[in-house]
Amino acid sequence: MATVYTVPKLTDYSPASFETATRDLLSALESESSAIHGDTDWKIFRDRWMARKDGMVTQINDLWLKAAPKEAKREAGQRVNELKGKIAASVESVRQRIQGGRTASRLTSDSVDITLPGVRRPVGVEHPVIRTRNELVSVFRNLGYSVSEGPEIESDYYNFEALNFPPNHPARDTQDTLFIAGQDKKPPRERLLLRTHTSPVQIRTMERLKPPLRIVIPGKVYRNDPPDASHSPMFHQIEGLAVDTNITFGDLKGTLDHAMKAMFGSNVKTQFRPSFFPFTEPSAEMMVSCFICGGGGKRGAEPCRPCKTTGWIEILGCGMVDPNVFEFVKHNGYDPKKVSGFAFGMGIDRVAILKYGVDDIQLFFQGDVRFLQQFA
Ligand SMILES: [Zn+2]
């Protein structure tokens, strides 16, 4: 068993005697320092060698220098100073090894062998719904429309009332709309719900900006629908609104016909059929000729499913803004006697489904990389 080193008294102060004592001390310093592996060890080691009271440095000072006879003092002083320096350096280098160890080993493990081939990181792409949204937005941006957005949690006022929904309209029922719980004490128009369409942003924008106005409104909307292949409680809409003096149904038809050609190809045709929405009058459904079968209703010998063999796909709802809607924002320059406008809205997910031939809307929201990779 190794004995613990202690500083010996010197019997004489000859160079030979100093040599031996110095060698023994340095060898003890060396072997003790190399056995240290932690912070606690290091503090004990530091105190054993450096402590003012009784540390090794103090001891060599007392036993080798102070005790030296006058004629040996000079020699002893040099030797002791040299040793103090070596002891201090050793204590410091052990500290660096222990406390800086983490950094040093990190540097080693993080170091890069630049001769190895690089790690290829997979590059992400736009989700098909987002890509479709961006395409639709850019079609209208090119026509001078700007983008407007609004909250997904809306009040009954913006979602229904200001859009001319009568008080007992079935859409206001909890069967169709997801209301925020615990609002029974609030007046009906202040009750909060998850917006069922992007149309509330029409009112919000008209409250903020005076006419003329040309905006598209993309965003998420919510309905109380159980999920199936063609329904999702959350889906995406894009909606447009143009207000100016002398806007006519002809402007609506021309704009939307152009937009469909920009989106699906210059060969597509459009057709309008009468419909009803509370916030437009007159209202229409717009059909676009099937861009999958080219309007023939067949793909080879097979019936074309997306258009149900009719050659037409119902793509959006539209109409002239109902004057009753303008009444709600009349104070901001939307006098129904002076301005007119048209509005339209469509499901972005539905367009993406048609465009990419996807047969289940749920696939868009399940986050399955195997599905999404097909669009990379
Ligand atoms: Zn078709």
Image (cartoon, rainbow, N blue to C red):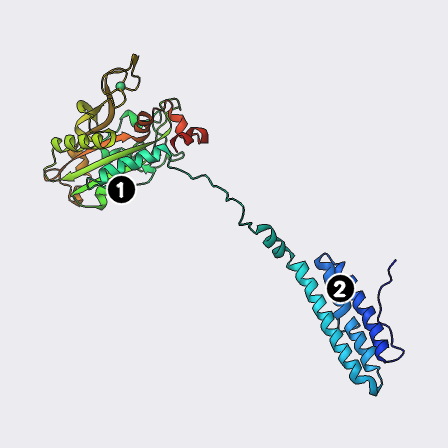
Identify the residue under disc 2.
45
The amino acid pointed to by label 2 is Phe
N-terminal of the two: label 2 or label 1?
A: 2
Q: Residue at x 18, y 42 (%)?
A: 213
Outermost residue toward the bottom in this view: 70
- Whether residue 142 sits left or right of residue 227 in the image: it is left
For the residue pair 19 and 89, the one nearer the viewer reads as 19
Dot 1, crowdedness within 10 Å: few (<14), some or many (≥20)? some
Ligand 1 is found in which quarter of the picture?
top left
- Whether residue 74 sits left or right of residue 100 in the image: it is right
- Residue 177, percent from left and from top: 34, 29
The amino acid pointed to by label 1 is Ser
Dot 2, crowdedness within 10 Å: few (<14), some or many (≥20)? many
Identify the residue under disc 1.
148
- When asked about the image quadrant of residue 322, the answer is top left
Question: Would residue 187 be visible to someone looking at this image?
Answer: no
For the residue pair 13 and 254, the one nearer the viewer reads as 13
- When asked about the image quadrant of residue 333, the answer is top left
Q: Quadrant of the N terminus?
A: bottom right
